[in-house]
Amino acid sequence: MTSGAAWRQPDGKPVSCLEKIKVLDQNIAEIRTLCADALEDGVLMGCDADQIKAALHALVDALEPPGTK
């Protein structure tokens, strides 16, 4: 996780399974790389960095947990 904080279950308890933690950490690392690449590409193509970052934030904000639709 980004800040070294523990992954939490919905009830606030920390996730304790090391394999789950490893997968979650890997997913975040991959997403960070993809976002950095998208930002770099956009800036190199002349787009405003703040607009790209806002689009990435909007994308994350629009995500819904599975089974909530």
Image (cartoon, rainbow, N blue to C red):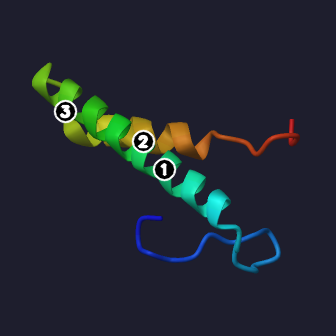
Disc 3 + disc 2, Cβ < 8 Å? no
Q: Would residue 41 be found to the left or right of residue 25 on screen? A: left
Assign a secondary structure to mark 3: helix
Cα distance, mark 3 to mark 2? 15 Å
For discs 3 and 2, the disc positioned in front in the rendered view: 2
Residue 39 % position (x, y):
25, 35
Mark 2 element type: helix
In the rendered image, which residue does mark 3 sit on?
40
Q: Secondary structure at mark 1?
A: helix
**In percent of the image, x 36 and y 35: which residue is there?**
34
Name which residue lies at 70% across and 74% down.
Answer: 16
Q: What residue sits right under mark 1 in the picture? A: 26
User: Could you tell me residue 31's position as x and y percent?
Assistant: 44, 42
- Quickly name the residue at label 2: 30
Residue at the spot 42% in from the left edge and 39% down from the top edge: 56
Farthest residue in the front direction? Answer: 19
Q: Quadrant of residue 3?
A: bottom left
> The residue under label 3 is which amino acid type?
Glu
- Judging depth in this view, the residue of 68 and 19 nearest the camera is 19
Q: Earlier in the sequence, mark 3 or mark 2?
A: 2
Query: In the image, what residue type sits under mark 2?
Result: Glu
38 to the left or right of 59 = left
Q: Which circle's residue, 3 or 1, is located before the other in the chain?
A: 1
Determine the CA span between mark 3 and mark 1: 21 Å
Circles 2 and 1: CB distance less than 8 Å?
Answer: yes
Quadrant of the frame with the C terminus: top right
Residue 61 vertical position relative to residue 59 in the rendered view, above or below: below
Say which of marks 3 and 1 sits in front: 1
Vertical comparison of 66 with 29: above or below: above
